[in-house]
Image (cartoon, rainbow, N blue to C red):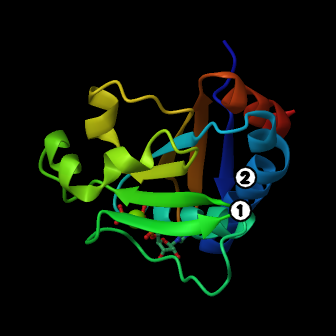
Amino acid sequence: MMATPHFITRTGRQTTELGQKIGKLLRADILPDFPGKGFHMALNGDLGAGKTTFVQGLARGLNVPESYYITSPTFNIINEYPCDGRALCHIDLYRLGAADELEFTGFQDLLDQGNILIVEWPQMLMDDDFFFDLVLDFHLTENFSRKISFSGSGQPASNLLQNLFS
Ligand SMILES: Nc1ncnc2c1ncn2[C@@H]1O[C@H](COP(=O)(O)OP(=O)(O)OP(=O)(O)O)[C@@H](O)[C@H]1O
Ligand SMILES: [Mg+2]
């Protein structure tokens, strides 16, 4: 059986750098091949696992202007940033009670506009069979290390994983 593709990061900075690398790859090599298509990522992992830390780097790689500070969307549910004519939508469902509460967040309007969605605490959407191109699982290992495992479905994700892990 093939091992799950993963990275180990030893510091928060390394996790940010991994996010940045993936953001750059998406912007330069993956998204241009799929015009108009969005890209949906789910980030699983415990409190403090490094999900928001990863998104801080992803945003930089996607060319979100430096003037935007990437904060956790825990209280607003959705933070939106401009990047190259699309939006990066950083979503945190931790405090959402039920999937139908998403109606009140503007979530539906953000879909099908070719936006990049990245969702922390995505279980509720996964239970709803929402399509995620890429699912990342963050595990705390020893000390400050994190194991970040990747699984993808569809052509854009497959191209991305090929590029990252070959
Ligand atoms: N290897 C590492 N990768 C990521 N973060 C790390 C690592 N080592 C230490 N840290 C620290 O762990 C914390 C991770 O916090 P972060 O807000 O990114 O977690 P989170 O998964 O988004 O949590 P929450 O579910 O509460 O939103 C940061 O303070 C970061 O500096
Ligand atoms: Mg977070």
Report how far apart the C-alphas of labels 2 and 1 lie in the structure. 16 Å
Residue 64 in which image quadrant? bottom right
Tag 1: residue type?
A: Asp
Q: Which of the two discs, 2 and 1, labels the residue nearer the N terminus?
A: 2
Residue found at the far left of this picture: 97
Q: Position of residue 90 (x, y in %)?
A: 45, 60
**Considering the image in quadrants, where does the C terminus appear?**
top right
Task: Examine the rendered structure and indicate whether residue 18 appears above or below residue 128.
Answer: below
Give the structural element (helix, strand or loop) at label 2. Answer: helix
Left or right: where 14 falls relative to 105: right
Which is nearer the eye, 12 or 134?
134
Residue 151 in which image quadrant? top right
Task: Examine the rendered structure and indicate whether residue 105 appears above or below residue 127.
Answer: below
Which is nearer the eye, 149 or 69?
69
Give ligand 2's quarter of the image.
Answer: bottom left
Residue 11 marker: none
Left or right: where 67 falls relative to 107: right
Q: In front of the other: label 2 or label 1?
A: 1
**Considering the image in quadrants, where does the N terminus appear?**
top right
Task: Examine the rendered structure and indicate whether residue 78 appears above or below residue 100.
Answer: below
Q: Position of residue 25 (x, y in %)?
A: 80, 50
Label 1 belongs to which residue? Answer: 84
Q: Is mark 1 within 8 Å of ligand 2?
A: no
- Residue 141 makes an appearance in the image: yes
Left or right: where 130 falls relative to 35: left
Q: Residue at x 78, y 57 (%)?
A: 24
Task: Examine the rendered structure and indicate whether residue 124 appears above or below residue 142.
Answer: above
Label 2 belongs to which residue? Answer: 22
